[in-house]
Amino acid sequence: MAIIEQCEKCKAIDKKKYCENCKKSKDYFEVFKYSIGSDNKADMIPIHIVKAYTWNDVIKFVKDKHFSDEIKPNINCEKDFTYIDGKIISNDSTNDSIPKIKGCRIYLNNKIVFSPVSNNSKDLNEIIDITSPNE
């Protein structure tokens, strides 16, 4: 999971920078929305499987896709997952009925088994690949 070895050019710029010449591994991250229901229990709903090189890439993707710029969500990285707290932009029609949306959790999971991708956009077998060069 990560940039295995940076090229000299990227190394001189930033430790998080990479290009097509750097050695890196692609990993799969599961992204869940969570909310607090009327019973004060957290509901976890899977929303994406993201293919990325680094935690930073997938965190930026989730933050940009689901959180407004004005909210400044709180991002915390734990040992096994990362969570992003804050009000989520409600442009996702699949979860309109969920009360009090709180944020997202991201888990690294390279043991995911995929079936053929369907044309249904709600199908979580669809992988969002964000592994294009970071230039």
Image: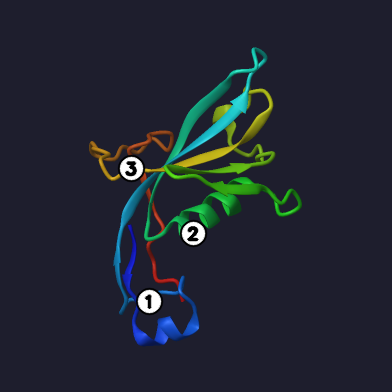
For label 1, the crowd category at 10 Å Cα-Cα, with few meaning under 14, some 14 to 19 and many 20 or more, is: some
Q: Amino acid at mark 3?
A: Asn
Residue sitting at x 66%, y 37%: 90
Residue at numbered disc 3: 109
In this picture the colour scheme is: rainbow
Residue that lies at the very extreme toward the front in this rendered image: 79
For label 2, the crowd category at 10 Å Cα-Cα, with few meaning under 14, some 14 to 19 and many 20 or more, is: few
| Residue 1 left/right relative to 10 | left
Q: Position of residue 48 (x, y in %)?
A: 44, 41
Q: Position of residue 20 (x, y in %)?
A: 33, 76
For label 3, the crowd category at 10 Å Cα-Cα, with few meaning under 14, some 14 to 19 and many 20 or more, is: some
Calculate the distance from the C-alpha at mark 3 to the C-alpha at mark 1: 24 Å
Residue at numbered disc 1: 19
Label 3 secondary element: loop
Q: Earlier in the sequence, mark 3 or mark 2?
A: 2
Residue sitting at x 36%, y 86%: 8
Q: Nearer the viewer, mark 1 or mark 2?
A: 2
Quadrant for the N terminus in the image = bottom left
Residue at numbered disc 2: 56
Calculate the distance from the C-alpha at mark 3 to the C-alpha at mark 2: 16 Å
Q: Is residue 49 above or below residue 39?
A: below
Question: Closest to the observer: 72 or 96?
Answer: 72
Label 2 secondary element: helix
Q: Earlier in the sequence, mark 3 or mark 1?
A: 1
Q: Which mark is residue 59?
A: none
Q: Position of residue 6 (x, y in %)?
A: 35, 77
